[in-house]
Image (spheres, rainbow, N blue to C red):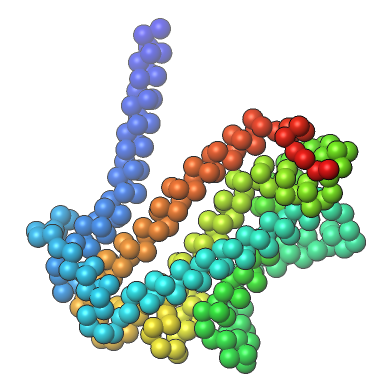
């Protein structure tokens, strides 16, 4: 008995030691980046973890654009516009498309699913050059063109949402139809409230993609005025646009990285609550016939 208790204690200690080690490995780069953002340094080399003198000059200089070269606030606004518009449009497209493919039966449905699966396996960068010339021909090398591409490519990401809709029992839809509900009422009054987890997941993924993208935005916006850049590509140009800029603007670049991480972190924390609530509400509430009014 003592031997079993001793082995269990060692196993527990080993698990916690491993978790602590992994937490340190994961958190150390984040903590280091935050601390470096408060360091006054123009050499590009930081030899201390904790700054000798804390300063917010990096943030002030970045937001005020004191050198007149890097309009960070413009980048932030451009990226926010592109991300929000892409999130709304992409979420609507994916949710509606997934619901149709999950619930409705129509001709060529199965071949369409197979073709979409194959197309989704190709990496997105294969089409970047073609998209560049298409947008250029329509004079849309702008934030609007980015939003169009981000939202237009969202349709192929329906498989996860479709799998979620497949888990909702069709008997719920049938019970609502017996009460006089049409397909639209079933979708808006039953399916959507039960689908809050997948809606949150879809919205998060749709927001993060344009917020952190710099490859495609660099191709589309690279020849434009710097005020039209997105934040990821703008920060990239900050340290790679000229010789010596990587050292001169290193700490400002780190401060910019911290700033752009804040909205994503807050968004995930805020929406995670709805994610959990959506799961529990969907499991506990189920279908309450008396709470719905279709007539």
Location of the C terminus by quadrant is: top right
- Figure quadrant of residue 292: top right
- Figure quadrant of residue 173: top right
Q: Position of residue 73 (x, y in %)?
A: 34, 74
Whether residue 40 is situated above or below residue 70 in the rendered picture: above
- Left or right: residue 193 compared with residue 241: right
Q: Position of residue 94 (x, y in %)?
A: 67, 60
Q: Position of residue 27 (x, y in %)?
A: 31, 49
- Left or right: residue 138 compared with residue 107: left
Q: Residue furthest left?
A: 52
Which is nearer the eye, 189 or 20?
189
Q: Is residue 240 visible?
A: no
Residue at left offset 78%, top offset 49%: 185
Residue at left offset 62%, top offset 66%: 89
- Left or right: residue 171 compared with residue 279: right
- Figure quadrant of residue 139: bottom right
């Amino acid at each position: 008995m003592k031997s079993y208790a001793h082995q269990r204690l060692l196993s527990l200690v080993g698990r916690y030691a491993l978790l602590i080690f992994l937490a340190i490995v994961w958190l150390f780069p984040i903590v280091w980046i935050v601390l470096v953002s408060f360091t006054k340094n123009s050499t590009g080399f930081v030899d201390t973890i904790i700054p000798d003198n804390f300063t917010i000059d990096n943030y002030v200089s970045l937001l005020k654009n004191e050198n007149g070269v890097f309009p960070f606030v413009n980048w932030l606004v451009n990226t926010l516009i592109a991300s929000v518009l892409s999130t709304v449009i992409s979420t609507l497209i994916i949710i509606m498309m997934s619901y149709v493919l999950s619930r409705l039966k129509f001709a060529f449905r199965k071949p369409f699913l197979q073709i979409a699966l194959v197309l989704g396996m190709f990496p997105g960068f294969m089409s970047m050059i073609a998209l560049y010339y298409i947008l250029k021909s329509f004079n849309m090398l702008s934030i609007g063109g980015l939003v169009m591409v981000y939202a237009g490519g969202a349709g192929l990401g329906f498989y996860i949402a479709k799998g979620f809709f497949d888990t909702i029992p069709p008997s719920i839809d049938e019970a609502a139809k017996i009460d006089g509900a049409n397909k639209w009422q079933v979708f808006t009054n039953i399916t959507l409230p039960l689908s809050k987890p997948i809606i949150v997941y879809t919205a998060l993924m749709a927001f993060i993609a344009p917020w952190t993208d710099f490859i495609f935005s660099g191709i589309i916006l690279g020849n434009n005025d710097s005020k039209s850049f997105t934040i990821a590509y703008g920060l990239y140009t900050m340290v790679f646009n000229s010789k010596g800029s990587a050292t001169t603007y290193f700490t400002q670049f780190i401060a910019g990285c911290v700033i752009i991480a804040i909205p994503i972190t807050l968004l995930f924390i805020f929406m995670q609550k709805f994610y959990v609530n959506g799961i529990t509400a969907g499991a506990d509430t189920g279908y309450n016939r008396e709470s719905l009014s279709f007539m």
